Image (cartoon, rainbow, N blue to C red):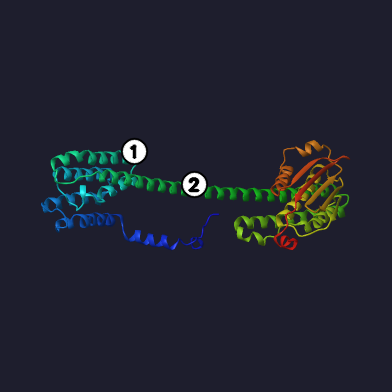
């Protein structure tokens, strides 16, 4: 289903809306500035105030600012920021400057830089930058211990780099997965919309074919009769012309209904669709037009779905149209059998001159009837009858309507 009305779209969860407001307020640039200032204030200012080893306050301030400042541009140049922050940590260790109160200047600066790099860059580039940063800080440990034995050193930066890279790469992979899922959903929605449009075009083309084929066949037959009888039997010619008028008006009414459905699908229910109860009227019109047609119904009629009744009507109509095309004047019979699980529509005639050609003559009549039956899960057979002529028989499974299901239960 594709939601076209934004007002009808479900509202996002409360937590998602809250996070969206925070994200809108905290723009990326302001957030990066806040992180850089926060790192300096939380881990270098205490050193300057005497909370740690502050033998060189100016140098500690310089290193603290140098380690925090690159975080301002961490999104723009993530790889460069990782290398720069790692270089600051290595330089501070080699210079014996503690710009945080912790061993090996432990702090989030390098971890934040590596996390952003893994989140924003390609995996190979971010992994290379993380390995360089981790190897650099780890390799500087023995040198720093040798130069400044009074200061303790550990490999905390190496472990921080490993954890930050794994977390950042996971976030990047999850974001990529969500984006791919959204693309798949959009493509699926577009394909479903195209399929729905194609099915609607096929349905309408089938309806137009049935209406036009039946009506024009009747008009053509009656026009030929009127032309032959006009001079010798004016009364019979008048009957034929009246049948032409009736058929053309009926076809125009049905075509107007189909065109209304094309222009405004919401009004589809307003256009009256033929049903089983309209078959006797169809047979009467054909009789008045001079075609020998009889109608018989067996079994217990009941309420069917609109799709089943329409398909049954169209199948009978198309079969009778084929009779007028290929066996004009031959008697035809329409049988409706209301079975327990199937509705059977059978149209039999006794006058096809070439049944094989009629069944496979390249037209759309029989294939269209077969499509209608298959769409309802039924079957349709069309071929020569046992006593000659031609037989079209459709077996349509009956699906109980919702109120009938409840009654049965």
How far across and down, in percent of the image, does residue 97 sit? 14, 48
- If the image is split into quadrants, where does the N terminus sit? bottom right
Closest to the camera, between mark 2 and mark 1, is 1
For label 1, the crowd category at 10 Å Cα-Cα, with few meaning under 14, some 14 to 19 and many 20 or more, is few
Residue under circle 1?
A: 124
For label 2, the crowd category at 10 Å Cα-Cα, with few meaning under 14, some 14 to 19 and many 20 or more, is few
Separation (CA) of disc 2 from disc 1: 26 Å
- Compared to residue 305, the image places residue 388 above or below, namely above
Residue under circle 2?
A: 184
| Kind of element beneath mark 1 | helix
How far across and down, in percent of the image, does residue 233 sit? 88, 51
Q: Is residue 196 left or right of residue 182?
A: right
Which residue is at a point 34% across and 38% down the rendered structure image? 124
Q: Nearer the viewer, residue 290 or 35?
A: 35
Q: Nearer the viewer, residue 388 or 118?
A: 118
- Compared to residue 157, the image places residue 354 above or below, namely above
Q: Nearer the viewer, residue 330 or 278?
A: 278
CB atoms at circles 2 and 1 under 8 Å apart?
no
Which residue is at a point 64% across and 55% down the rendered structure image? 259
Do we see residue 343 in this rendering? yes
| Kind of element beneath mark 2 | helix
Which residue is at a point 25% across and 41% down the rendered structure image? 133
Do we see residue 220 in this rendering? no
- Compared to residue 21, the image places residue 359 above or below, namely above
Q: Which label number is shown at residue 315?
A: none
Q: Is residue 155 left or right of residue 273?
A: left
How far across and down, in percent of the image, does residue 237 sit? 84, 52
Q: Which mark is first along the chain, 1 or 2?
A: 1
- If the image is split into quadrants, where does the C terminus sit? bottom right
């Amino acid at each position: 289903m594709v939601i076209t009305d934004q007002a009808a779209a479900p509202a996002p969860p409360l937590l998602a809306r809250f996070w969206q407001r925070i994200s809108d307020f905290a723009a990326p640039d302001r957030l990066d500035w806040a992180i850089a200032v926060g790192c300096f204030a939380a881990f270098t200012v205490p050193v300057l105030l005497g909370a740690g080893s502050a033998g060189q306050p100016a140098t500690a301030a310089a290193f603290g600012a140098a380690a925090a400042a690159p975080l301002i541009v961490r999104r723009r140049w993530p790889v460069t920021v990782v290398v720069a922050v790692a270089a600051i940590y290595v330089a501070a260790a080699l210079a014996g400057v503690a710009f945080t109160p912790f061993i090996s200047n432990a702090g989030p600066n390098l971890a934040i830089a590596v996390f952003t790099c893994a989140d924003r860059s390609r995996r190979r580039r971010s992994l290379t930058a993380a390995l360089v940063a981790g190897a650099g800080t780890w390799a500087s440990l023995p040198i720093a211990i040798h130069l400044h034995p009074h200061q303790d050193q550990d490999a905390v930066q190496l472990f921080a780099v490993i954890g930050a890279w794994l977390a950042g790469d996971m976030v990047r992979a999850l974001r990529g997965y969500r984006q791919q899922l959204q693309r798949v959903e959009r493509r699926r929605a577009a394909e479903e919309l195209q399929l729905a449009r194609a099915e609607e075009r096929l349905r309408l083309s089938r309806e137009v074919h049935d209406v036009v084929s039946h009506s024009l066949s009747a008009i053509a037959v009656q026009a030929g009769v009127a032309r032959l009888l006009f001079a010798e039997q004016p009364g019979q010619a008048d009957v034929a012309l009246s049948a032409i008028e009736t058929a053309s008006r009926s076809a125009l009414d049905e075509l107007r209904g189909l065109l209304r459905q094309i222009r405004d699908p919401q009004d589809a229910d307003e256009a009256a669709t033929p049903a089983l109860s309209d078959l006797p009227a169809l047979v009467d019109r054909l009789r008045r037009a001079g075609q020998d047609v009889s109608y018989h119904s067996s079994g217990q009629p009941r309420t069917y779905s609109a799709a089943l009744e329409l398909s049954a009507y169209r199948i009978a109509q198309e079969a009778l149209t084929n009779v007028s095309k290929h066996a004009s004047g031959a008697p035809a019979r329409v049988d409706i059998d209301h079975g327990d699980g199937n509705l059977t529509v059978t149209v039999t005639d006794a006058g096809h001159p070439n049944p094989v050609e009629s069944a496979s003559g390249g037209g759309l009549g029989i294939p269209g009837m077969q499509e209608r039956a298959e769409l309802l899960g039924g079957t349709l057979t069309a071929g020569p009858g046992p006593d000659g002529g031609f037989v079209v028989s459709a077996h349509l499974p009956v699906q109980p309507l919702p109120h009938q299901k409840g009654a049965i239960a």
